[in-house]
C-alpha cells in the first residue's frame, strides 16, 4: 500500500535519460504545500545537475494536475515574505538563478489552476488532456499571479488574451489554451502522459548539449532580441562541432545507425 504524507510529496523516477517528476497529493487535488514546493525544486535541481539526465517530464497522480496552492499552509509564509524555495536550488518556474538549462515536458489533466498554469508556461512542451480546466484565479483571492504568468501569457497570447484570463480569473479549456499557444498538443483524457512521455523520449534521444544550446539561444532571442541571439551562434556552433556528440552524430549518419549521445 502506498504511504502518502498529509502535506503531499513529489515523486521522482529516473527512466533512462529521463527524470519523471510526479505531483502526489491526489486526495487534496494535488494542492501545493511548502513541502511540495521544496521537493519540486529538489527534483528540478537533480535534473539540472545530473549528467545522465537529459529531459524532465512533470505529471500528476490522480484525476487532476493541481487545484493550486493550499492557501492555509502557504498564505502565512507569503504574508511574512518568506520564500518557498531555498537558495541554490533550481526554480521550477525558471525565474531566478540558477536557471534551468535542460528541457521539461509537462502532462496536464483535469483541474489545472494557478501554479499548474505557471508550471505549464515555464515548460518547453505542454500536453493537455481534453478535460483540462485552466484558471489563473489569483485575482479572485485578492492576490496576483507571481510565478511568471503576467509576462509569459502576454508573450504567448498577446495583451488582450492575456488580460482576459488574468483579470477575470475565468476558466479556459484545453483547446483555448492551445489556441493561445500555452499548450502544444491536446489529446483525449487518459492519453496525456503517454503523449508527453513520447515527446520527452524523443527530446532525450537527441544530443543534449545541442538541445541545451538551442534552448538558450531561443531564450536570448525572446529576452534580448534576435540580434543578440544571432551574435552567439557562431561561437556556440564552433563549440558544438568539437564535442564528442557532434562526431557521433556524423559517424552514426555514415554508418546508418541510431546515434548514442553522451552529453560531451
Image: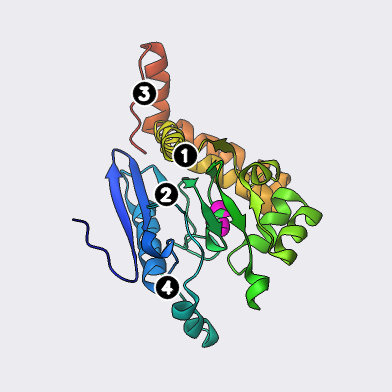
Q: Which residues are magenta?
A: 117-121
Which of disc 2 and disc 3 is earlier in sequence?
2
User: Within 10 Å of the Cα at label 4, are there few (<14), some (14-19), or many (20+) other Cα atoms?
Assistant: few
Is residue 20 visible to the viewer in this orientation of the structure? yes
**Residue beneath label 2, please?**
59
| Percent x, y of residue 148 | 61, 62
Q: Nearer the viewer, residue 84 or 223?
A: 84
Quote the CA–CA distance across marks 4 and 2.
25 Å
**31 to the left or right of 171:** left
Quadrant of image for the N terminus: bottom left
Magenta residue check for 119: yes
**Upstream in sequence: badge 2 or badge 1:** 2
Q: Which residue is mark 4?
A: 87
Occupied quadrant, residue 178: top right
Marked residue nearer the N-terminal end (4 or 1): 4
Q: Which residue is mark 3?
A: 259
Q: Which mark is residue 192?
A: 1
Q: In this orientation, does residue 25 appear?
A: no
Q: Taking 232 as reference, is 6 left or right?
A: left
- Residue at 32% across, 39% down: 17
Q: Secondary structure at mark 4?
A: loop
Amino acid at each position: 500500500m502506498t504511504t502518502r504524507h498529509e502535506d503531499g510529496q513529489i515523486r521522482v523516477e529516473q527512466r533512462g535519460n529521463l527524470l519523471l517528476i510526479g505531483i502526489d497529493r491526489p486526495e487534496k487535488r494535488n494542492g501545493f504545500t511548502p513541502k511540495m514546493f521544496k521537493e519540486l525544486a529538489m527534483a528540478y535541481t537533480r535534473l539540472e545537475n545530473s549528467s545522465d539526465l537529459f529531459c524532465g517530464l512533470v505529471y500528476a497522480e490522480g484525476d487532476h494536475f493541481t487545484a493550486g496552492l493550499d492557501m492555509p499552509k502557504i498564505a502565512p509564509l507569503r504574508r511574512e515574505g518568506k520564500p518557498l524555495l531555498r537558495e541554490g536550488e533550481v526554480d521550477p518556474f525558471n525565474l531566478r538563478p540558477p536557471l534551468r538549462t535542460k528541457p521539461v515536458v509537462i502532462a496536464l489533466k483535469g483541474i489545472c489552476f494557478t501554479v499548474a498554469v505557471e508550471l505549464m508556461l515555464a515548460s518547453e512542451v505542454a500536453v493537455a488532456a481534453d478535460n483540462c480546466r485552466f484558471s489563473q484565479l489569483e485575482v479572485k483571492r485578492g492576490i496576483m499571479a507571481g510565478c511568471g504568468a503576467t509576462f509569459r501569457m502576454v508573450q504567448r497570447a498577446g495583451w488582450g488574451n492575456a488580460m482576459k484570463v488574468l483579470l477575470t480569473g475565468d476558466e479556459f479549456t484545453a483547446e483555448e489554451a492551445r489556441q493561445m499557444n500555452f499548450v502544444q498538443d491536446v489529446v483525449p483524457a487518459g492519453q496525456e502522459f503517454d503523449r508527453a512521455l513520447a515527446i520527452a523520449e524523443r527530446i532525450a534521444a537527441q544530443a543534449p548539449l545541442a538541445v541545451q544550446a538551442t534552448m538558450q539561444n531561443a531564450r536570448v532571442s525572446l529576452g534580448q532580441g534576435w540580434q543578440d541571439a544571432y551574435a552567439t551562434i557562431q561561437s556556440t556552433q564552433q563549440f558544438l562541432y568539437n564535442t564528442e556528440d557532434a562526431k557521433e552524430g556524423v559517424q552514426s549518419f555514415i554508418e546508418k545507425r541510431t546515434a548514442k549521445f553522451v552529453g560531451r
